[in-house]
Image (cartoon, grey):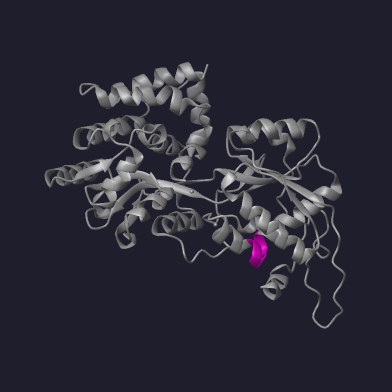
Amino acid sequence: MKQVKKAFGLLTAAALVAALAGCGSSNSGNSNTAAGSEPASGSAAPAKEKLQKISIFQSKVEISDALEALTKKYTEETGNEVEVWGAAGDDYMTQLQAKLTANQGPSIFSIGTGAPADKLKSYFYDLSNEPYVKDIAPNMALKEDGKVVGVPYGVEGFGLVYNKDLVDPKNVTELASFTKTMEELKAKGINPLSLSQEAFFLIGHILNTPFALQPDPQAFIEKLNKGEVKMADTKEFQEFGKFMDVIKADSKNPLEVKYDTQMGDFATGKTAMVHQGNWSYTMLKDFGNMDDKLGMMPFPLEGNNKIAVGVASNWVINGKASPDEIKAAEAFLNWLFTSDTGKKAIVDDFKFIPAMTNIPADNLDPLSKVVYDAAKSGQTIPWATNYYPPNIVVNDLTPVAQAYFLDKNMTGQQLLEKLDAAWAKAAK
């Protein structure tokens, strides 16, 4: 989802001491000695344990300054040092692999869910017994072989963002009601639903739903890669084709719509619904306060009633670091996810929707609030897009979607057949 985020740009010292009670790691046997642990009431305060200096390397350029500021607070509060290596942007994975292969660290690094995580899983340290793991929102932890190996940065979600003055979600629950609502809006001169021409906003995200509704989306994608299944033969995709036919028939051609135009038309009431994510609020707020009108509902394929919520990146500890370095890395992550200072930074400074149930998020915008509540309750469908072959959306699926919207005679079923052919070529 990093691709789309570029366009829009996606969770008191005294209280801290209390929050740090129980810090440390059951893995390391350090639970009662980690830096910052609260002394027992009435007893002399133990000396803070000096831990090895650690390093952090992460991919999200947007939080670089805030992360550096946070690590300075960590040093002030615990006496332990953290060095933040400069974010590498698009070259992050290449640099990370080079450093890990050369045994040059880092102690903690970020990793994307899906293919990137599969590639570097041999470096992941087992976090399963860390105290904060119990607070990770349902289905959001990065796991390998049943072990928790990564903690999500935060969560993001997408679905049908709608104008409450124009659409009642009770009337958009499956194909028939979706079609009726689309036709009624069109009859009123309102564009019912807008996609836009950017690759993920045209086909990448909306195609996620039929994958996400498979019993095992990742296994289905693996079979699709091998040519053992086809979208055109699978009922969830067949209904997806019907939804796409309704969108093509009743909405403005998305090839004529850019993201900023899509947001502007939605904000001004010319469009009733857009297939978008919580990140779109960043652009919508520039058109004025419409918080009271904003809602997000599931894309109702096969009666789906869940928002697509996922994790773009995760914190992991380098399992091939020295025991002392791992111990220090554990202490930092524990502080990040349990201290008031760390939790506040995740929401207020990093601007993440927290993927932890112990982190309050009282001031989220309306779309982020929908995503946060869905993640907290576990009422979500996954981001199958994380398991697509690399670059397939931009290079292979988007040209097919463009052809579909340019050809009035191409049906949704034919769209699926052409998507199958493009997928087979990309997966070779």
Give the residue at x 53% y 16%: 428
Q: Is residue 115 visible?
A: yes
Give the side of residue 198 with respect to residue 223, left or right: left
For residue 242, which quarter of the picture?
Answer: top left
Query: Residue 134 in the image: x percent, y percent?
Result: 64, 58
Give the residue at x 73% y 30%: 98
Magenta-highlighted residues: 337-342
Query: Residue 75 in the image: x percent, y percent?
Result: 76, 61
Give the residue at x 74% y 37%: 123
Task: Inspect the magenta stretch and tell me whether residue 271 lies in it.
Answer: no
Give the side of residue 193 with respect to residue 221, left or right: left
Relative to residue 372, is residue 39 depicted above or below? below
Query: Residue 354 in the image: x percent, y percent?
Result: 55, 56
In front of the other: 361 or 134: 361
So how many labels did they put on this image?
0
Relative to residue 417, is residue 325 depicted above or below? below
Give the residue at x 45% y 52%: 379
Query: Residue 169 in the image: x percent, y percent?
Result: 28, 53
Q: Main secondary structure of the magenta part?
A: helix
Q: Residue furthest bottom?
A: 42
Give the side of residue 39 with respect to residue 383, left or right: right
Task: Inspect the magenta stretch and tell me whether residue 338 lies in it.
Answer: yes
